[in-house]
Image: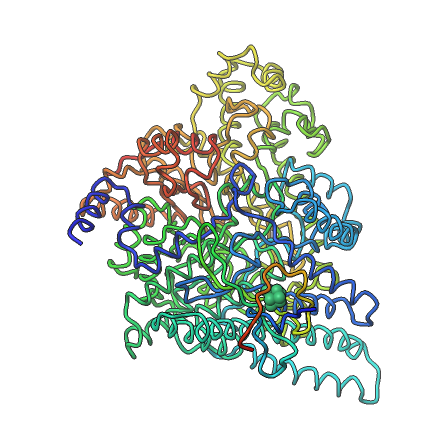
């Protein structure tokens, strides 16, 4: 079962790597931005359509 | 470049200021302005592409459920829910931006707070235009959230403690609008406490810790007193305040972290990388510590505004950005020169954009009443300092210039004019008006300072700190003077006063007895009886609206507390009492008087045609009104055309206007707020003149049910001011703008052709001199030609950016209803000179 911590979009907190932010690039009809939402490193990513395997971490 | 310069000139010559602005602004501002999702509803519906944000309601509900069986008192639970949202909501940073923070999870999301009122939640369920896809899933979430908060929302909790009779009359929508909630209205801020650079969140937290420790010690000394009992509540309140401030600091740091992640992992452009690292530094600093730079100051202010709007629906944005950010502008631009004027202009412009995109889901009648905008965010500029000296500074100019570049319709500005304002500032104001922004409106500072002292007893140094609490009403931004919540339901649809004179208080639109059961108007034998009935109806309507507000203010501290707003308010930090507690508030209440002038014109028509000339009887008039003038067109036109109308310097009708105002002013001193202060009236309209068109029945001024009402305040009826601008000013100057009411809105339309060039400026300046000499407190201008407005009606796509002054606010012309558009075109264009 993949988890968020294996995802390229996951950025762990230095002080608590069990938690982190899911950071994504979004381009909507008006603007481009980066968004972030707190996630747990161990969160199940199986159903996440945005999951991208991180090969560097 | 040559081609661009020429095109810019062409646009300026054609007075197509919106295209000129696009050419003039920096690339950053151009990107950010076009990136902005406009949130104002059009015809009561949100524009395509906007969606109700379900993220926050879900978080609020899950946290509330989790806390349901916790032993925490309500105020602490409430603070924890707020903190949970700030800690977990999605945040974003838009390309090119330097200021960050938004209420919703994404830029095109409208936040919905399900904890406020079941009536609001029901509208969400039934709003198919803005429910996000997939619809089934969203509806399931909405139904769960709405179900959970049914019976638990603020209004559900408060209503059983209200007088049901009053509540039903208010909720009928006939005589007032808004609901009496401390988390739904207009919240002032104690800027003198929080925005003067002396303290920020960490300092307040340290103070709160001291307070809690002291209280805890006292509460456990040998002895038992009432004071000790009160301390338990105070400690809870201080604790709740602390929770919200700590969450605010963490929220800032979340942005710092995101900016750093983008800079280090995504951004290839070195300049942008530096900007992102700068954002990170700023958000590490504020709101925890006091700002040091203009960027930090603006960011700090923005965070405070957003936190407060996470706590409540705020329909206004009382602020004085030049006064509180000016010292940072001065230091960065003029003393330390760490910022160029152009950079500062970019920041000022972006600050306007960040504010313009803020949105909170509102009930449909509020969206209809505020066509095209999110709320009445009237920012105050200019004015005097506490010592009476001129407060204008570099930031005043920067904001006025930035407004012309970004051309947002909300926020708008209102300028506190006083005799010491320098000519260069007046020229910047004139440019905004000439370029068709519809703002700033101009306020007469000496008159309004005296007015604040007269009506509410604010000491002069405090009165001089005043900001616009909403569109029009001044409120100090001081410890005891600032108004934590103006509950909007003390907003009277005053045309009902004269309508009810003829129906003995029965409202035939909503089919209920709302007004007083005054004697049958058909039996009146002289004008005095008509006027006496008018006074009785006025007193009845005002009382119906004021009583629920007073009651809600008494209930608010315990039932609907505001821990965050309390935490940034000196009086609450000091006392441990909720910011809405009347005992620590001087009081600054007012009744907004929508659709006011119809009363004077109607009474004048009755007096002249029925009692002076005896052309008609009261029975005939009553019958004509009951039948909406049907079959009586000739008679109706007599009432329209052959009687004096307000705004023409005619003592006959002007005297009646004064009689009405004096009666209302007298009663205003009998109506008391829970702080023991007065309830003066304030005639103005937002776009209530259109909203109420189908709610107000036929009137003796010749108006039929369905016709737009006058555009408000003390503005003459559209097209009825036939004697020129000086006659309008003279009529208005018969009112004592200090003692007859809290403020009086005056709309004027000017010709853009006449305002061209230096001559135009001089003409306007001399008009303003007359206005000031006559002692009026307010004036605002529309300066877009009929031709442009008609073209915009024909071809809205091409005129998306044309702005007009609606009433106490501005809106993009294409975003307001056809009826309001026509109403603005009908207003008389006044020739100056
Ligand atoms: S994209 Fe999905 S899997 Fe990846 S971090 Fe975000 S939530 Fe987790």
Left or right of B818, for residue B14: left
Q: Percent from the top left, x then y, of residue B346?
A: 34, 63
User: Where in the figure is residue B655, as x and y percent of width and height?
Assistant: 46, 34
Where is residue B349? Give x, y as percent: 37, 59
The answer to whether residue B583 shows anywhere in this view is: no
Q: Which colour scheme is used?
A: rainbow
Side (left or right) of B292 relative to B506: left
- Relative to B520, is B381 above or below? below
Residue at 27% from the left image edge and 51% from the top image edge: B23
Q: Nearer the viewer, residue B592 or B257?
A: B257
Q: Position of residue B598 (x, y in %)?
A: 51, 31
Locate ligand 1 by image quadrant: bottom right
Residue B513 higher or lower than B625, as above or below:
below
Q: How many marks?
A: 0
Q: Can residue B536 be seen in this view?
A: yes
Residue at the image point whose x is 83% and y is 89% from the top = B222
Instruction: Pick the residue in front: B419 or B798.
Output: B798
Give whichever of B599, B747 is nearer the camera.
B747
In the image, is B434 to the left or to the right of A12?
Answer: left
- Nearer to us in this view, B784 or B501: B784
Residue occupying image coordinates x 59% and y 48%? B668
Please state, as top left, top right, bottom left or bottom right, where the N terminus of chain A lies in the image.
bottom right
- Asked where in the image residue B827 lies, by quadrant, the reply is top left
Q: Residue furthest front?
A: A55
Q: Residue at x 60, y 32 (%)?
A: B496
Seen in the picture, residue B317 relative to B246 is either above or below; the reply is above
Q: In which quarter of the image is the C terminus of chain A?
A: bottom right
């Amino acid at each position: 079962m993949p988890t968020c911590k294996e995802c390229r979009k996951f950025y762990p907190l230095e002080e608590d790597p069990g938690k982190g932010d899911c950071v994504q690039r979004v381009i909507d009809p008006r603007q481009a931005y980066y968004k972030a939402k707190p996630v747990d490193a161990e969160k199940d990513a199986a159903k996440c359509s945005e999951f991208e395997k991180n090969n560097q971490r | 470049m040559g081609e661009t310069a020429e095109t810019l000139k062409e646009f300026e010559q054609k007075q197509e200021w919106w295209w000129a602005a696009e050419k003039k602004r920096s690339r950053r501002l151009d990107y950010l302005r076009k990136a902005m999702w406009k949130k104002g509803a059009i015809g009561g519906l949100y524009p395509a592409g906007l969606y109700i944000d379900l993220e926050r309601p879900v978080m609020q509900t899950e946290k509330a459920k989790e806390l349901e069986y916790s032993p925490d008192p309500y105020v602490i639970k409430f603070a924890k829910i707020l903190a949970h949202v700030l800690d977990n909501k999605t945040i974003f940073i838009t390309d090119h931006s330097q200021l960050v923070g938004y209420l919703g999870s994404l830029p095109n999301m409208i936040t919905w707070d399900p904890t406020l009122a079941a009536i609001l939640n029901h509208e969400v369920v039934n709003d198919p235009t803005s429910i996000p896809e997939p619809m089934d899933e969203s509806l399931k979430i909405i139904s769960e959230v709405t179900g959970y908060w049914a019976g638990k929302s603020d209004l559900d909790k408060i209503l059983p403690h209200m007088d049901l009779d009053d509540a039903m009359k208010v909720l009928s929508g006939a005589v007032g609008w808004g609901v009496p909630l401390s988390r739904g209205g207009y919240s002032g801020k104690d800027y003198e406490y929080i925005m003067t650079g002396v303290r920020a969140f960490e300092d307040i937290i340290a103070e709160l810790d001291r307070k809690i420790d002291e209280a805890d010690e006292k509460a456990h000394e040998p002895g038992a007193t009432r004071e000790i009992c009160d301390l338990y509540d105070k400690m809870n309140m201080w604790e709740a305040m602390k929770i919200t401030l700590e969450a605010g600091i963490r929220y800032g740091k979340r942005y710092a972290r995101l900016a750093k992640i983008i800079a280090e992992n995504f951004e290839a452009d070195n300049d942008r990388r530096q900007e992102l690292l700068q954002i990170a530094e700023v958000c590490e600093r504020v709101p925890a510590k006091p700002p040091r730079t203009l960027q930090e100051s603006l960011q700090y202010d923005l965070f405070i505004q957003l936190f407060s709007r996470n706590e409540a629906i705020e329909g206004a944005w009382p602020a004085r950005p030049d006064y509180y950010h000016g010292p940072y502008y001065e230091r960065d631009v003029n003393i330390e020169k760490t910022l160029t004027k152009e950079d500062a202009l970019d920041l000022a412009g972006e600050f306007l954009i960040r504010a313009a995109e803020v949105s909170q889901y509102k009930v449909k009648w509020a969206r209809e009443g505020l066509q095209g905008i999110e709320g009445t965010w009237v920012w105050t500029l200019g004015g005097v300092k506490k010592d009476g000296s001129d407060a204008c500074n570099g930031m005043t100019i920067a904001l006025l210039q930035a407004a012309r570049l970004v051309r947002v319709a909300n926020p708008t500005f209102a300028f506190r004019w006083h005799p010491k304002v320098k000519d260069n500032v007046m020229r910047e104001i004139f440019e905004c008006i000439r370029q068709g922004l519809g703002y700033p409106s101009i306020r007469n500072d000496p008159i309004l300072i005296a007015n604040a002292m007269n009506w509410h007893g604010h000491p002069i140094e405090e009165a001089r700190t005043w900001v616009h609490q909403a569109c029009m009403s001044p409120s100090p931004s001081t410890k005891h003077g600032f108004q934590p919540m103006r509950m909007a339901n003390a907003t009277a649809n005053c045309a009902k006063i004269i309508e009810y004179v003829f129906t003995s208080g029965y409202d035939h639109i909503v089919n209920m007895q709302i007004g007083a059961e005054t004697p049958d108007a058909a039996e009146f034998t002289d004008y005095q009886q008509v006027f006496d009935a008018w006074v009785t109806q006025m007193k009845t309507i005002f009382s119906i609206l004021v009583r629920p507000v007073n009651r809600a203010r008494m209930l608010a501290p315990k039932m609907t507390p505001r821990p965050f707003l309390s935490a940034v308010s000196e009086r609450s930090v000091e006392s441990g009492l909720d910011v809405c507690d009347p005992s620590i508030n001087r009081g600054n209440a007012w009744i907004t008087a929508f659709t006011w002038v119809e009363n004077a014109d109607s009474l004048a028509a009755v007096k002249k045609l029925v009692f002076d000339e005896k052309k008609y009887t009261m029975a005939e008039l009553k019958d004509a009104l009951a039948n909406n003038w049907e079959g009586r067109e000739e008679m109706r036109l007599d009432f329209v055309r052959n009687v004096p109308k307000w705004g023409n310097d005619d003592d006959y009708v002007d005297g009646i206007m004064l009689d009405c105002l004096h009666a209302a002013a007298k009663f205003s001193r009998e109506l008391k707020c829970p702080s023991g202060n007065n309830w003066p009236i304030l005639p103005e309209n937002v776009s209530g003149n259109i909203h109420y068109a189908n709610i107000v029945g036929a009137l003796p001024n010749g108006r039929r049910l369905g016709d737009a009402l006058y555009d408000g305040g003390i503005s003459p009826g559209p097209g009825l001011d036939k004697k020129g601008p000086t006659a309008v000013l003279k009529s208005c100057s018969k009112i004592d703008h200090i003692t007859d009411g809290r403020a009086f809105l005056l709309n004027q339309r000017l010709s853009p052709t006449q305002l061209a060039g230096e001559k135009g400026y001089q003409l306007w300046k001399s008009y303003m001199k007359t206005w000031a000499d006559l002692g009026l407190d307010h004036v605002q201008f529309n300066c877009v030609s009929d031709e442009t407005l008609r073209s915009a009606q024909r071809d809205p796509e091409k005129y998306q950016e044309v702005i007009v002054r609606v009433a106490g606010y501005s809106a993009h012309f294409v975003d307001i209803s056809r009826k309001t558009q026509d109403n603005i075109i009908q207003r008389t264009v006044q020739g100056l000179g």
